[in-house]
Image (spheres, coloured by chain):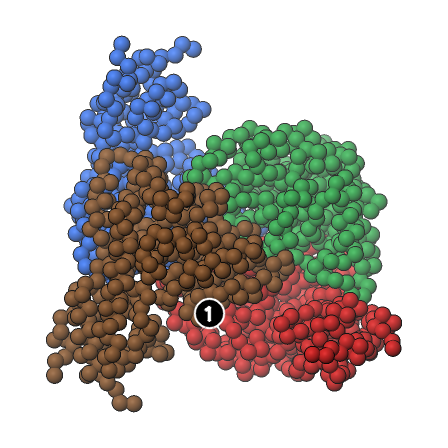
Chain colours: A red, B green, C brown, D blue
Amino acid sequence: MVSLDDLTPPERSFASDNSAGVHPKILEAMSRANVGHQPAYGYDPCTARADAAFSELFGRDVHVFYVWNGTGANVLSLASLLGPAQAVICTSAAHIDVDETGAPERILGVKLIDVDTDGAKLKPEHIEAQTYALGNEHHAQPGVVSITQSTELGTLYSVEEIATLSETAHRNGMTMHLDGARIANATVALGGTTDVLRSFTVDAGIDVVSFGGTKNGMMYGEAVVFLDRDLAKHAIYLRKQITQLPSKMRFISAQFEAMLADDLWLDNAAHSNAMAVLLHERTASIPGLTPGSAPKVNALFPSLTRSAIVALQRWCPFYDWDMATDTVRWMTSWDTTEADIARFGDGVENVLESHTEIS
Amino acid sequence: MVSLDDLTPPERSFASDNSAGVHPKILEAMSRANVGHQPAYGYDPCTARADAAFSELFGRDVHVFYVWNGTGANVLSLASLLGPAQAVICTSAAHIDVDETGAPERILGVKLIDVDTDGAKLKPEHIEAQTYALGNEHHAQPGVVSITQSTELGTLYSVEEIATLSETAHRNGMTMHLDGARIANATVALGGTTDVLRSFTVDAGIDVVSFGGTKNGMMYGEAVVFLDRDLAKHAIYLRKQITQLPSKMRFISAQFEAMLADDLWLDNAAHSNAMAVLLHERTASIPGLTPGSAPKVNALFPSLTRSAIVALQRWCPFYDWDMATDTVRWMTSWDTTEADIARFGDGVENVLESHTEIS
Amino acid sequence: MVSLDDLTPPERSFASDNSAGVHPKILEAMSRANVGHQPAYGYDPCTARADAAFSELFGRDVHVFYVWNGTGANVLSLASLLGPAQAVICTSAAHIDVDETGAPERILGVKLIDVDTDGAKLKPEHIEAQTYALGNEHHAQPGVVSITQSTELGTLYSVEEIATLSETAHRNGMTMHLDGARIANATVALGGTTDVLRSFTVDAGIDVVSFGGTKNGMMYGEAVVFLDRDLAKHAIYLRKQITQLPSKMRFISAQFEAMLADDLWLDNAAHSNAMAVLLHERTASIPGLTPGSAPKVNALFPSLTRSAIVALQRWCPFYDWDMATDTVRWMTSWDTTEADIARFGDGVENVLESHTEIS
Amino acid sequence: MVSLDDLTPPERSFASDNSAGVHPKILEAMSRANVGHQPAYGYDPCTARADAAFSELFGRDVHVFYVWNGTGANVLSLASLLGPAQAVICTSAAHIDVDETGAPERILGVKLIDVDTDGAKLKPEHIEAQTYALGNEHHAQPGVVSITQSTELGTLYSVEEIATLSETAHRNGMTMHLDGARIANATVALGGTTDVLRSFTVDAGIDVVSFGGTKNGMMYGEAVVFLDRDLAKHAIYLRKQITQLPSKMRFISAQFEAMLADDLWLDNAAHSNAMAVLLHERTASIPGLTPGSAPKVNALFPSLTRSAIVALQRWCPFYDWDMATDTVRWMTSWDTTEADIARFGDGVENVLESHTEIS
């Protein structure tokens, strides 16, 4: 019988969209930006063009602050929105809550009110349930609602769901932050047009977006987009204060300029999402594997036996998701190929044949 | 008479080494790193190679943490060194004190004890003067001494001066941080060899270095180098917590790998320093200009009349340094050319001829 | 029929042990301390005597820091225990989590990992469940376990339960904090002797205790007791830094000296606990009232109809506990009298007769 | 010859007004407040009366927040005034800068821009000199000016000086905080009437006052008085969040009620100030002593030989002020008597006769 070691692993792993490199068009744009001297800190023409592209994207005069990474984007967003003694409502699966090593708490001194939810999706009643604290001096005052689209579990809010959350938040004097580390994948999943993007952000009452770039084929860089410019008035100082001001800014803005030109941001995400569907289709019915839901964006959450997981991970890296249920995460990216999926599918099939355990 | 507008301005300004682009070898290294998937967050072979290069550079097994920018490097350094209720002693010209929008205070909750000094250089007596607070519960406890080499004013500490500062700090239970945003320029100014670097860091008792890259021809990225590995044990968590963990790490480490290979870091700084000397020589004796000291690194601080400054800045950008004395800063970089200096010199000469004011 | 307005309300409400005044012996001790000048900040003989009394109480050489209030005691405890990038594990009913307006997050920059539990009691598996984060740079590192005895819901940990929690925490490199805002009531409930106190603190592996005074008949003042003196080495600075250093310290230590002399702290709590039992017995079988569990300490949580609650609160103040279930909190204190209970019982009976609603 | 040991030391030391006890009228007021149950956290009638007394004192509807101590009062004041990324301008002798163990930095994450001054008095040009930073993202934004009246060096601002500072601050978009730990002594020194108090606070453009109680004969407690009520809207939450909310509030407000009734606050300070003048007169011409300026409030700063200082401190405690110049601080308080001064004067005379050193 053929063993896993006899099979050639995929050229690209399914570990993370952070393991992928940089899209060629992005890298070319960075090279093109490397000409002569430019004013530092964003006062260069390339940054002005990227700003204009974002305003065109959202269909209004937005205020954009480019930052280094996703944690920085989220911390800057929250720093700009939070008032004195206020707290953030989020889910207990939120990246800001569990995957940022307590950055919001340390840098902002803020309490995160993290709510257990189904599928990492906040509901209006979760917001309502926290309003008891408003006006009570013994409790941090809920001031910001932060949601993630697509969520940390690969699920999606509908346009209506976000609109209702925003309405609930605003009615209670709170503002809305959207962590869009994978906003491109979400946009594609909901229809894949600029109108779709606007429908679940600007039109749905979102105030500030962490607009992801790195996971979608950029080298580094995220954009904090203030849909409501009035909320941005301290962000210029806060960005520097939280260590998120890039000096040679043109190399971030050049990436975003390239991303937003010719819908590269959507193309990359569309490819990544499609590859996830393909991987799901290739593996869902392999005996011994319990597939998760059909992927909406670029992550699958199947379950396998522990020994199969271990063997596969040695062969082609990916992450455990829930050790208790032997659920793993397989993540595609902008550069995943059909050949990668074919090879990986063969590997899964091979390993499950040989590792079928008798319980 | 020929007016300034008739002269062609330099291709590169004298505003900042942050206005310069990326050295071609660095950009090539980044392109080379852009192959396939790599583990994120620094668990890739390129980062391992850069780590090894740093250990070779310092002649000991150092622990390196790559971060986004200089403010991040300084905040991570201090975060790692500071104990409960401790304060940092620095000069009142220190970048951490005046040019980071209060990042150390906000993120670390730390008091900076900033001392007025000559030439932005701390002296042992400044440290001794703060020891009165040790053991007194009403005062933040001086715990870290932070110096900058080369300093914010373009001056240099001698090896002996740093060694004495370190001895004073350590004798009083404090640790030593060196902000080396321009450590390459300082190394060149003191002799330009690896031994020189070691002499004023490892051998002089420095505990942690913020090792600059961006200002010396990189696109982004700085390295926090723990010369004493024992002090690094929490840095892995602190880096993420202060928003300074790059996901696609290979693109920073590839830059540093290229920098340290074939002494590119020294070559870039040597060029930049030499250009500053050239600019000083070209302009020092122009009537109407009061030159600053001959430059040790890559910045000049001459004085001119206000109207000459304004005219020149419109023609070729640079920064005011002290409005009260009409002192400006002219900064060279790794890519400044002799032609740039020739043109700029002509411009200065022209403008001072026409703007000589009668007082 | 007699209406509630015809009945004389109790002289003392059942709102909170914070509504009670100061025990006469405490007030006398404060007056006695008011003689001449004494060194400020705790360097006075009275504070030395209170320190000695605490060491005698716990049967070892403890290190005590007197502070203003319970939030301050908890923040100082956690500040002393937390290392860099560490988090606190607590229940989602913990006072530090929900009743301190985010003080730990703001002052300490710390993440509270709050766990949903039965009866506000943490279990070893809750600690074990968080150990996945240890060593992972993307997560705040669980470093301190904080429990409350008696809990915010009036429940109690057994000695064995605390010992097992401590063993679990220590085995995973964490320390143990006990919020003892009502530690006297807990001690009484578990047997009422010094040995009992030691059994669930020193002997059960607790490292630091917030030892409550205010709710048990003092005017103000709590004590942070380091059972492990090694953990106290920064507390002297941290106390001042978090605004919790009383200048005229003798007036707090005099209160504690009086509290610990002749077991006043146990007598006060015993009385308060006994009054809660009496109130439970008087009201549990009144038609229309759903009693909570028999009280272990000094709080009852019965349910009544909304209209009955409103009428009663207007007549004699107490707090809503859970509006969804019309559960209220009746709290006794060191000065509650049998006459207060008799009157209150009559009032409850009266109001439930007249407010029985037809559903 | 008679030695110092043969002389009876004063009954009260000259160490600090924090070493003094509590004025009998204050203690009586606290006892009177100890009747029955009262709503906690300031919702009691006594606190309402104290609030009204403060509004009457300042001649307008002020908003008062009672807190535990001076550091807490200052931190709450600044917390209420500071906007995002803002800094505080103060002198380098300010209590907030050097005597609070970095509490503002830790709790507020704020930069203190501390200016060297003559006599601990800020001047308008110190404020103007910081305006260069306004609008520059690389610098913390000066947002609050904090002055101390009477200052940490026992000096006084005139009404005009404060008005000019306020005008300068407000013109530049900053707010004014006055640390009035010894505001009563200052009021007395400037004329001793309510009108005088108003002249250098409300009428001079001060926005928020830390109104001291403890050093003027109270047991504990300070009041943060918002002269501009609009600035107080978050203070109710911030007070709890920074650990400064007293539960049994009536015992602070009862003290302030007694203080403001019948001008006790002015009488205590007038006595204390007068005793300082008497001590100055008794000692200024003793051979071997270099007197400081005649005291304006309740502190003297004379210089003596080191051996005389040591001998005197052993006999009757007081603090060194500047070891380099052998300057000490002698502080009087509300309870200093003429007999205390007579005895202390004799001691100084005796010790200087026997300790006159030959240089």
> At label 1, which amino acid type do we have?
Thr
Q: Is residue C244 above or below residue A99?
A: above
The answer to which image quadrant residue C347 occupies is bottom left
Q: Residue at x 63, y 57 (%)?
A: C135
Residue C156, percent from left and from top: 38, 64
| C158 sits to left or right of D196 | right
Location of residue D144 in the rendering, given as x and y in whole percent from the top left corner:
43, 49
Q: Residue at x 64, y 53 (%)?
A: B236
State which quarter of the image contains the C terminus of chain A.
bottom right
Looking at the picture, tell me which residue is in the foreground, C323 or D107.
C323
Q: Position of residue A190 (x, y in %)?
A: 64, 82
User: Mark 1, chain letter?
Assistant: C
Evaluate whether residue A217 shows in this view.
no
Q: Disc 1 marks which residue?
A: C117
Task: Return the x and y of residue D223 as percentages of the image width and height.
Answer: 30, 50
Q: Quadrant of residue D200?
A: top left
Give above or below for A230 relative to C24. below
